[in-house]
Image (tube, rainbow, N blue to C red):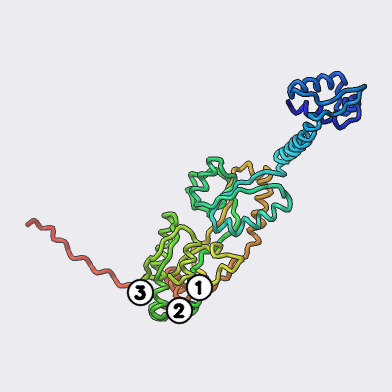
Amino acid sequence: MNLHQLRIFYAIAQSPTLTQAAKQLGLTQPTLSQQLSKLEQKVGAKLFNRALNQMELTNAGQFLLRRAQIILNEVDETQSHLHEFASGMRGVIRLAGLNSIIRVVAPRAIAFLKERLPEVEFDIHEMAPAEVLELLYGRQVDIGLIAANSVAKSSVSFKEILLLNDPYVFAVPSGLGLATVAAPDTDLAPDERRVVNSCIRFNFGSHHARRVERWHQEMLPRHRQVVQCRSYEVALSMVRAGLGVCLVPALAAHDDNGGLAGIDLYATDLPGRQTVVMLPSQYQRTEPYKTFLDALRQASSAVCMPRILPMPPFISQAVARRESPEADLGRPLEKPMAPIDLQPR
């Protein structure tokens, strides 16, 4: 049977006469009778007992009526929802990005979106920038949330829109008290000095890894790497346990549920992580992505950074030495090279 025949059957069953059912459907009575006969042939049973234009359901007809109500309701609801997809009122937004960004920005953005488009669903993936870009190119996700410059510009053909600037902070175990420390080697107790010089590193891309390494060499010349991990969350858990210190974006330490317990954050001079939303350019004008993009901007502007303490003296002094034009005047002269004897022997 097909839906057209099922709708005809349902209309006949709900109407007192065949004539009224024909009028309701906009069909002639002979056409209605013909379609009903074809349906009875397909199901192999009589659906109505006919008597002087009166239509009385048989047992098979009563069974089909119950099923028809369910089927036609489902079809009508499906058609209605498909229309919502076409108009952008309903859909599935596939979102991928860094955990530290998605965890803070996405919930707020989704809450904003639900106020306008409550039927939109989300499929969220947490992964590294290169993997996000791969899924975007493969059309497996619609929107990416990553740090700007975390992927090569030459490989990007998507629209990038800046959402927020996320400062890099120096995360240390609570109570270490670096506010007055000008020289860790002399101002800290041995156990504290060991913690400050124990570096926990997130496995960055090569360019950022070199920048972080240079920063540690300038600020903590006696440092050594004790842990390398694959997520900021793991790195912060190591800091909380007192195993060492690490550089993280402030949002990685952001947690509305008291995630900063056991950790102090200090300002650094490192350039902040610029978070961008990456998507195909046409999505800026297509629902529901257009509204979600607005929601991401609104959520980003509402983000409150965790408490960041001023730069410790030993860091601010190292920054001042680096930026001073006289920074090199105090360095000892290099030992002159011994003359090279070029005479043949």
Give the distance between the C-alpha atoms of the residues marked 1 and 2, in whole angstroms.
10 Å
Q: Can residue 160 be seen in this view?
A: no
- Residue 311 is labelled as 1
Q: Earlier in the sequence, mark 1 or mark 2?
A: 2
Task: Say which quadrant the N terminus sits in.
Answer: top right
Going by the numbered disc 3, the residue's amino acid type is Gly
What is the quadrant of residue 306 in the picture?
bottom right
Q: Can residue 171 be seen in this view?
A: yes
Give the distance between the C-alpha atoms of the residues marked 1 and 3, in whole angstroms.
24 Å
The residue shown at (49%, 52%) is 150
Characterize the local packing of mark 2: few (<14), some (14-19) or many (20 or more) Cα atoms within 10 angstroms: some
Q: Which of marks 3 and 2 is nearer the N terminus?
A: 2
* Residue 98 position within the rendered picture, expressed as x and y whole percent measured from the top left: 53, 54
- Residue 70 is labelled as none
Going by the numbered disc 1, the residue's amino acid type is Met
The residue shown at (30%, 73%) is 332
Disc 3: which residue:
330
Q: Which of marks 1 and 3 is nearer the N terminus?
A: 1
Going by the numbered disc 2, the residue's amino acid type is Val
Task: Say which quadrant the C terminus sits in.
Answer: bottom left
Characterize the local packing of mark 3: few (<14), some (14-19) or many (20 or more) Cα atoms within 10 angstroms: few
Q: Residue furthest left?
A: 345
In the picture provided, is 44 more to the left or to the right than 313? right
SS label for mark 2:
loop
Which one is closest to the eye, mark 3 or mark 2?
2
In the picture provided, is 112 more to the left or to the right than 208? right
SS label for mark 1:
loop
Q: Which residue lies furthest to the right in this view?
A: 52
Disc 2: which residue:
181
Q: Nearer the viewer, residue 301 or 233?
A: 233
